[in-house]
Image (cartoon, grey):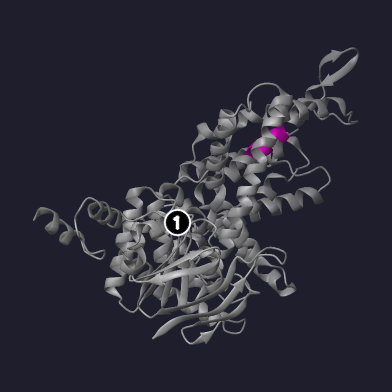
Amino acid sequence: MDNLTFGRYSPYNTVVHKLDPRNKIFLMILFMVGIFFQFKLWSVSLIMSGVYLIILIIIMLLSRVSFVQLFKSLGSMWLMVVFLLLIYIFIPTTTHKIEPEAFKIFNYAVYWDSFCRAGYIILRLVMMLSLTMILTSTTKPMDMTYAFEWYMTPLKLIRFPAHEIAMTLSIALRFIPTLLDETNRIMKAQESRGADFSHGIGRRFRAIISLMIPLFVSAIDRSEELANAMEVRGYDPRAKRTKYRLLRFHFKDLLAFVLIGCIFAGIITLFVFDQQSTGGIDILQVIFNVKGF
Amino acid sequence: MNIIEVKNLTYSYSEEQINTLHNVNLTIKRGDYVSILGHNGSGKSTLAKVIMGLCPNYQGTITINGKELNKENLAAIRKDIVMVFQNPDNQFIGATVEDDIAFGLENAQVPHKEMRDIILDYANKVGMSNYLDKEPSNLSGGQKQRVAIAGVLALNPKIIIFDESTSMLDPKGKKEIYGLISLLKKNNPDLTVISITHDIEEAYLSDYIVVMNHGEVIKEGTPNEVLKNASELAKQNLDVPFQVKLIDALNKSGFDIKEDASLEEVGDIVCR
């Protein structure tokens, strides 16, 4: 159960924690789009990645997200790293921007370029991961569901059940710890009756069946009782309800919105010009008068 | 004045099954503390669910606070009558204590500005005001039940049904809830409390007792009337209250004590 700690909400009282969750989600999506812009020149893409990294680190420091936890969760990405490397090595491209051969496997030339591309993709994935981690560890799960509900409100016009989905989400979140407790209890009960959760795939599979069935039965029982409890307290998904938690867009939200918005407006403008120019915009040439690659 | 009237109520969960409730007649007076007593499978929880309107398709009539229970009246009746369930985990809807108390208020369309005060007030009444931002996983069973009680009390009901609300709690939690119920009764004498239980000691605290078995009401009356006969209670698979057991045992060994004597009177007689 320990690997569930990734991105869990940590109750600090920082500026990032206090931002409106709707704002945070919007800015995160903006950031993610920015990360996946591919510029025509390698040097420009790398410089932009550096810019993103600096912004990310500043936000992480501001929101007191632990770097240790991030690096720990990166450990589980090794399989993906290997997979990406293999793909980039064995999918031949006609243009190798970074030309020199690294080495040969049975006469198959492996270029440094493949490593660079794989590394670049992984860097972007790591940035995405840290972004989501910043969001989830500074925003209460419930606030997140309120934000989702707010974003889905326009869909109510086409009878999309926005409120129902948000309510379902929030109840699911509420019951995660309860069901985890239950899982542990059933596991112990079945182990004491001879189920084996730790040896051999066949045995483990059988043991997991003996865990899943009681868990499902109890979850269904719970849901019925919960439905009754909600009905007794007057819940009607179609009726109008007032709200105890109101999302408020404060001045600091506006500030964050304008700041990050401006940065990304700049980046998007740069990207558009880059795509329209024939050879791409060479930032190194413009600023330092050094030719980029 | 009768706040609940049940006439000729018959109910079964599915067509082929035998009736879970069979020809139940019951009247409950406003402001009473009524215990519905019975062992497992006697139909006492089903009776509560039917009264709450959670089980439609019953036969007979149910009138609650002057309104007959049917589809049109259901929403209005739900404003008068609430229920606290058995499992403290399965009725905790909000993410935190305050959100859970707020859930019913949101449904009742209480304006946002008033909610905070109401929540604070009822959290105070059940002694949970220091736990407002706590999540259910950090609370004990008794605390969760107290939050559930605050959640339904905030709706300002006329009747509260406790459906074995203490059966999953430890002795300390049980005591807290009993204390809370009697406090509620003291502060608001008009509140009708119906407690469904198989705990005879709790039933002894109430004003009126209804004993159920096999889906029928087999006995009703004040605790002294219903609980005085130890051997008959044992026949219904019910425990005998300590006090009744004591008097029974003393009478067998030569004392002559009236069946409805209080513990103090028993003490006086024995010490004489």
In the picture provided, is A147 more to the left or to the right than A89?
left
Residue A261 is at least partly visible in this image: no
Quadrant in the picture for the C terminus of chain B: bottom left
Give the residue number, with chain letter if any, for mark 1: B235
Taking depth in this image into account, of A39 and B99 the one nearest to the observer is B99
Check residue A1 for magenta coloring: no
In the picture provided, is B27 more to the left or to the right than A183?
left
The quarter of the picture where residue B185 lies is bottom left
User: Label 1 neighbourhood size at 10 Å, few (<14), some (14-19), many (20+)?
Assistant: few
Q: Residue furthest left?
A: B272
Taking depth in this image into account, of B117 and B229 the one nearest to the observer is B229
In the picture provided, is A147 more to the left or to the right than B198?
right
Task: Tell me where residue A71 appears, x and y as whole percent.
Answer: 56, 31
Q: What is the number of callouts on the image?
A: 1
Q: Residue at x 86, y 25 (%)?
A: A90
The magenta span reads: A120-127
Residue A20 is at least partly visible in this image: yes
Circle 1 sits in a helix, a strand or a loop, which is it? Answer: helix
Q: Residue at x 70, y 54 (%)?
A: A269
Q: What kind of secondary structure does the magenta stretch mostly adopt?
A: helix
Task: Tell me where residue A162 appears, x and y as whole percent.
Answer: 66, 66
Q: Residue furthest front?
A: B254
Taking depth in this image into account, of A280 and A246 the one nearest to the observer is A246
Up-down relation of residue A138 to residue A65 (above or below): below
Three-letter code for the amino acid on which mark 1 is drawn: Lys
In the picture provided, is B32 more to the left or to the right than A204?
left
Chain letter of mark 1 equals B
Q: Residue furthest top?
A: A106
